[in-house]
Amino acid sequence: MALFQGLEISGFRNLRDVQFQPHPKLNFFAGANGAGKTAVLEAIHYLVRGKSFRSVQPQDLIGRDAEQLLVRASLKLEHSDHAPVEAAVLRPRQRRQQVRWRGESASSFSKVSSGVPLQVFLPSLSDLVFGGPGERRKWLDWGAFHVEHRYLEHWRSYTKCLQQRNALIKQASERQQLVRSPEFRAFTDAMIGAADAVTGARLSYLACWRPFFESRLQQLVTGSALAQMPELNFRPLGSSKSLSLQELLVESASRELKSGITVYGPHRADCELLLENLPLASAASRGQGKLIALAMMIAQADVIADRTGVSSVFLMDDLDAELDEKARSRLYQALSECRAQVFITGVRPGPDKKDASPASLPDSYALFHVKQGSVTQETV
């Protein structure tokens, strides 16, 4: 992992000629709505992953009066005595963008993203608790990808077989046509084998993640009026039945012909949170849901650091929403302990000492004020 030591941003949305030196742990960005706080996080995200977390066209990121956008960072590599390295992206309106990593041109953002792993906390974070299985699968895959050896290889193999199997289902007019097809049987067998590998890796990851989650949950949710701690109910194949994938495929054959897709498998897995054997989504408040989702994400960074020695970079947008002062203080303490460099936006200027004991506040942090596209640092 690489720590951000210096950032330069210009022509990115309303940000113009911004330069600052981040704190190695906690960085707070305060300002009115529309001042450019989220744009700072978005610029970091664009530098690392080559896209916006707002799902817009890259050209829309260039400021109205700018001819190009530039995001450049000085990065200190962990466990290295070498001088900081540079990562940069320059995107003109009329020409192709240029990406640089360690002083050399790069054909894509892959080298930057592999050197700077990101965890993104958006206002929709509570969808991990209240939303559908898709968001939780993304969260699960991100953790397994970093922790479990060959996970990406297994997942790619599975999805390739799944796509080929689905194509044959769509072409078939009756069940017997599929049963007689040696090609369909071959893809089904290969898919089941890859599915076993994917599920095994996911289970292994969750087993490592669970104690970290329980610890973070105790830390963040204390006093939030939950009757008891929620539990994670993992359905690896998207079914509540205790059947193998082979058995589920036989049982769902008619449904597959009607829908034209494979109904069960790791692509339909879910990590549902339960409270007293009921879905947590129906029992928790929005604030509690956000705290639980935060515990899930921070625990993921914990297990990645524990298993690989790699720290994370957190981008946390609009942290104030749905959290009171005491909840925020507990969160700041958790972030101080976590192996991560954190960038936080909010209307409030940093940690609120009003309702918190000194022990629950971070020892040091950087506070930046964002106003009309400019960023200034305040001494704290």
Image (cartoon, helix red, strand yellow):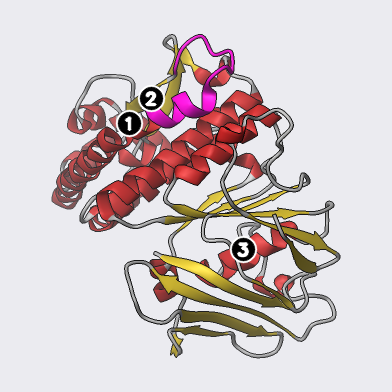
Residue highlighted by disc 2: 232
Q: Is residue 86 magenta?
A: no
Q: Which comes before the other along the chain, label 3 or label 1?
A: 3
Amino acid tagged 3? Ser
Q: Is residue 144 visible?
A: no
Amino acid tagged 2? Leu
Mark 3 → mark 1, Cα distance in angstroms: 31 Å
Number of the front mark, 3 or 1: 1
Left or right, 138 with respect to 183, comes to right
Residue highlighted by disc 3: 52
Number of the front mark, 1 or 2: 1
Magenta stretch: give its range.
214-229
Q: Is residue 227 magenta?
A: yes
Residue highlighted by disc 1: 210
The answer to whether marks 1 and 2 mark residues whose Cβ atoms lie closer than 8 Å is yes
Mark 1 → mark 2, Cα distance in angstroms: 9 Å
Q: Secondary structure at mark 1?
A: helix
Q: Residue at x 57, y 40 (%)?
A: 332
Q: Secondary structure at mark 2?
A: strand
Q: Residue furthest front?
A: 358
Placement of 66 over or under 39, stated as above or below = below
Quadrant in which the N terminus appears? bottom left
Q: Secondary structure at mark 3?
A: loop
